[in-house]
Amino acid sequence: MPYEFEEVLSTIKMTEIEHFDIRTVTMGINLKDCSDRNVEVACQKIYDKITRLAGKHVENALKIESQYGIAIANKRVSVTPISLIADSFGEEEFIKIAETLDKAARQIGIDYIAGYSALVQKGATNGELRFLNSIPYALASTAKVCSSVNIGSTKAGINIDAINIMSEKIKQTAELTKDNGSIGCAKLVVFCNAVEDNPFVAGAFHGVSEPEVVINVGISGPGVVLDGIRSAGRVDFRELAEVIKKTVFKITRAGELIGRKVAASNNVEFGIVDISLAPTPAEGDSIADILMAMGVEDVGAPGTTAALAMLNDCVKKAGLMASSCVGGMSGAFIPVSEDQGMIRAVEAGHLSLEKLEAMTAVCSVGLDMIAVPGDTPATTIAGVIADEAAIGVINDKTTAVRIIPVYGKKVGESVDYGGLLGKAPVMPISTLSSANLLLRGGRFPAPMRSLTN
């Protein structure tokens, strides 16, 4: 679809007044050809390939940012899931690879590197089990590395054994990074139905069906949508839907333009634009504020899930009209710590973990950047992950859990990470036990809707 210069000019108001930015341009890099039986050789191959292909990624993104006057908040890299290229390695060798990824990320100046990942939705190899054990230490010894594990899918069902392992690894990560607010858990996400072209961290990885190198772009824009809804006034839902769609159409067009320009400047292929509305802790850049502008008194009120469902649907419809390259997760994100309106709702007691879970049935991903008391049992965390995975499996959608049992913190306290990670209020979580359910182990069978062949 061709782009006119006037389309770029139309974004000036969005960027200057309404917090619009490109949340991330993420370069995906295939590392399958970096596999080697010698970990030192594998690490050198990985470092050399990332620094060669992405060495000017930040520089080129900054040039495009300056040329078009649209901020690019994050410049990132995602790589082939590390567990796939190093299945013969032990825990210590996996950690060396994580440290190599971190070194490469620092060298090229990116914000995060993602893909310290595993896909174990139907079972885990011996190498993958060793990889899972390495995750807490890898995240504790690096600053820019992000990790994800896919534990379920509509086709495969839910790997409860993997959930139990990951709940323990989340607790271990929290303890190992306790001196920094258990921040390691903010870089770790557990997925169901993970997608291969997601540009957002912590869940990004370069899927095995992706090309050698690709640029995927993730947009922002809650502030732009909020301004459109407020300007529309008290219109009915059909008119409101049109307002949202027209606004998201413009955002998507601008996002794809920037993504293509960055891809061309790096001389690599353009992949997709992820049209997820990604909030920030800045005032006026909030999904919660959008829902309130739609009419709920505060997030968590009856009607919140319905409003979010409509917003998410409008985002998808507009994105598909604006671009033939929509991918990733595409919808509306509701990360608590990264959304000032969500933070206020939690602190006011209006938004509970249970209501958030209901909202995840209709939004882009799942329970994101949720802080809970540090003494929350691993089996309770496993139950939360299993619930989200069930929503994903039954509804054939991506769901995820990025939960932070903040070491030493209790309900009513908070942890401030600064930047885009924001401030996480510690939320109450049920003290009822799910241990007898989760410790059955094994795998939930795939649902009937998996039989679509």
Image: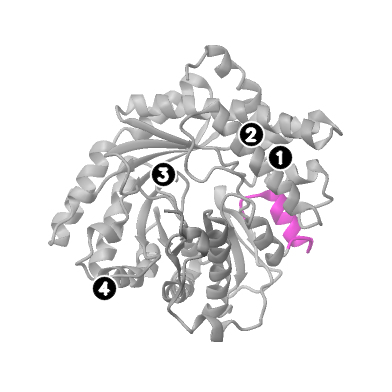
In the image, taking residue 165 as reference, residue 369 lies left or right, namely right
Residue 427 belongs to the span the image colors magenta: no
Q: Nearer the viewer, residue 305 or 12?
A: 305
Is the C-beta separation of discs 1 and 2 under 8 Å? Answer: yes
Foreground disc of the pair 4, 1: 4
Percent position of residue 138, x then y: 35, 64
Q: CA distance from mark 4 to mark 1?
A: 48 Å
Q: Disc 4 to disc 2, how far (Cα)?
A: 46 Å
Q: Which mark is residue 284?
A: 1
Q: Amino acid at mark 2?
A: His
Mark 1 / mark 2, whichever is N-terminal: 2
**Residue under numbered circle 3:** 197
Q: Secondary structure at mark 3?
A: loop
Chain part drawn in magenta: 337-351
Q: Mark 3 touching mark 2, by CB under 8 A?
A: no
User: Which residue is pictured at 39% across the width and 69% down the height?
Assistant: 136
Q: Secondary structure at mark 2?
A: loop
Circle nearer the N terminus (4, 1): 4
- Image coordinates of residue 90 in percent, x first then y, are 23, 71
Q: Position of residue 331 (x, y in %)?
A: 59, 43
Q: Amino acid at mark 1?
A: Gly
Which circle's residue, 3 or 2, is located before the other in the chain?
2
Image quadrant where residue 261 sits: top left
Q: Which mark is residue 19?
A: 2
Q: Which residue is mark 4?
A: 126
Earlier-in-chain disc, 4 versus 2: 2
Residue type pointed to by label 3: Asp
Q: Is residue 73 left or right of residue 442?
A: right
